[in-house]
Amino acid sequence: MQETHRMIWPMAGLLALICLLGCFVYLTIIFPHTMLAWEASGEALSATQKWLVALSQFCGRNFADIVVTLCMLMLGMGLWIGVMMKGWIGGR
């Protein structure tokens, strides 16, 4: 049972990072093309679409900062998981 718990947290962390990275790639690479199509259609944008446009523009402008932040998060999470698995914190 304890071995299962040791495998769950690293997998959950990895899955969360993959989801974050997927959202980031979508907002910075894929979504701007959709945004251009919305603007070209000439229709009024809904509040949700305006919010997504603003978020996409923010991610596009701050690409390097967000990549560095994600790398630091991955490093920190890796260290935290390593320390937890060794049992140095909250362990035996």
Image (cartoon, rainbow, N blue to C red):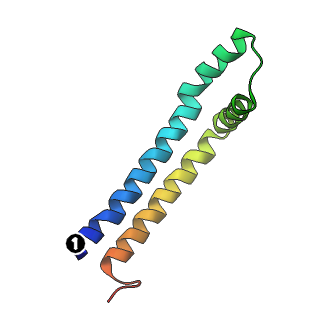
On-image quarter of the N terminus: bottom left
Residue sitting at x 75%, y 22% = 45
Q: Is residue 83 left or right of residue 52?
A: left
Relative image position of residue 74 (x, y in whole percent)? 46, 57
Percent from the top left, x then y, of residue 55? 68, 37
Q: Residue at x 29, y 70 (%)?
A: 5
Look at the picture and state if 66 lies above or below 12.
above
Q: Quarter of the image containing the C terminus? A: bottom left
Q: Amino acid at mark 1?
A: Glu
According to the picture, the residue beneath numbered tag 1 turns out to be: 3
User: Which secondary structure lies at badge 1?
Assistant: helix
- Residue 7 vertical position relative to residue 84 in the rendered view, above or below: above
Q: Residue furthest top?
A: 41
Q: Is residue 59 left or right of residue 25?
A: right
Q: Position of residue 90 (x, y in %)?
A: 40, 85
| Name of the residue lying farthest toward the right | 44
Q: In the picture provided, is 17 more to the left or to the right than 91?
A: right
Residue displayed at 45% across by 64% down: 77
* Residue 15 screen position, x and y as percent: 39, 51
At label 1, counting other C-alpha atoms closer than 10 Å, the crowd grade (few under 14, some 14-19, many 20 or more) is few
At x 38%, y 54%, the residue is 14
**Rendered position, 24 above or below 8:** above
Q: For the view shown, which residue lies furthest in the bottom direction?
A: 92
The residue nearer to you, when weighing 29 against 6, is 6
Q: Quadrant of residue 91?
A: bottom left
Label total for image: 1
